[in-house]
């Protein structure tokens, strides 16, 4: 961005990371938010499946969660290195739990927003989706995993209640972005 005198205007952040459990609406909200901001939208899980040629469920079944997390870490590094303009990035449900990922996103100048949805609603949403979710096999395990991850989701993020329409959530995040302090060292395109 430039002022009328041609000087660069600091932007609030280089990107937005949407954090939350499966079914929280990160893709829906992310696409809407990116459109509102005129930014690029990326889904980290899609980046991983495109690079590997396999679905997340197939990766979990063939190699397990630990190997998937390695691929997720590598995909995040690639996305952050290749981002030439501001990005709204939907993270997979376990990405924010990995401390190295949190540090990478913070160093890259990304603001993290936790899309908070009650576990019963998350379960309902996941059960209605046609795609397989390897970690959504039974409600007890699902609830336990959510409770564990929610602690991490609340750390270093801005919590946004997300049991509303995607448009409402995207609008709230856009407004909250305007309230973030400007950081002179984070400039658009640098």
Image: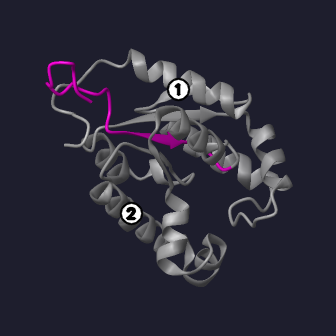
Name the chief secondary structure element in magenta: loop
Relative horizontal placement of residue 182, taking residue 72 as reference (left or right)? left
Expressed as whole percent of the image width and height from the top left, the position of residue 135 reads: 68, 61
| Residue at image coords 66%, 50% | 22
Quadrant of residue 159 within the rendered picture: top right
Mark 1 = which residue? 173
Mark found first going from the N terminus, 2 or 1 = 2
Mark 2 is surrounded, within 10 Å at the Cα level, by few (under 14), some (14 to 19) or many (20 or more) other residues, namely: some
Q: Is residue 29 above or below residue 57?
A: above
Q: Can you tell which of label 2 and label 1 is closer to the viewer? A: 1
Mark 2 lies on residue: 73
Q: Residue 130 in magenta?
A: no
Query: Looking at this rendering, what residue extends furthest in the top direction?
Result: 179
Q: Which residues are magenta?
A: 1-22
Q: Is residue 107 above or below residue 165?
A: below
In the picture, the quarter occupied by the N terminus is top left
Count of numbered badges drawn on the protein: 2
Asked whether 67 or 36 is in front, the reply is 36
Do labels 2 and 1 touch, CB within 8 Å? no
Label 1 element class: helix
Q: Is residue 155 visible?
A: yes
In the image, what residue occupies the spot 67% across and 25% down?
168
Q: How is the image coloured?
A: one colour
Where residue 14 sits: x, y (%)?
A: 31, 38
Crowd band around label 1 with a 10 angstrom C-alpha radius: few (<14), some (14–19), many (20+): many
Q: Is residue 5 magenta?
A: yes
Q: Which mark is residue 185?
A: none
Left or right: 104 as drawn, with respect to 62: left
Image quarter where the C terminus lies is: top left
Check disc 2 and report its element: helix, strand or loop.
helix
Q: Position of residue 32 (x, y in %)?
A: 60, 38
Name the residue rendered at 33%, 46% in the picture.
85
């Amino acid at each position: 961005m430039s002022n009328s005198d041609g000087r660069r205007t600091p932007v609030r952040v280089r990107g937005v990371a949407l954090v939350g459990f499966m079914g929280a609406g990160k893709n829906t909200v992310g696409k809407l938010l990116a459109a509102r901001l005129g930014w690029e939208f990326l889904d980290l899980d899609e980046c991983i499946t495109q690079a590997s040629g396999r679905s997340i469920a197939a990766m979990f079944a063939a190699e397990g969660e630990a190997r998937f997390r390695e691929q997720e870490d590598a995909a995040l590094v690639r996305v952050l290195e290749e981002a030439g303009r501001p990005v709204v990035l939907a993270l997979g449900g376990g990405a924010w739990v990995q401390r190295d990922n949190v540090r990478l996103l913070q160093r890259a100048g990304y603001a993290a927003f936790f899309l908070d949805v009650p576990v019963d609603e998350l379960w309902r949403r996941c059960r209605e989706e046609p795609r397989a979710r390897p970690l959504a096999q039974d409600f007890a395990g699902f609830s336990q995993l959510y409770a564990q991850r929610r602690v991490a989701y609340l750390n270093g993020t801005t919590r946004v209640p997300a049991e509303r329409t995607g448009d409402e959530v995207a609008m709230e995040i856009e407004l909250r972005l305007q309230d973030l302090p400007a950081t002179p060292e984070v400039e658009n395109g640098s």
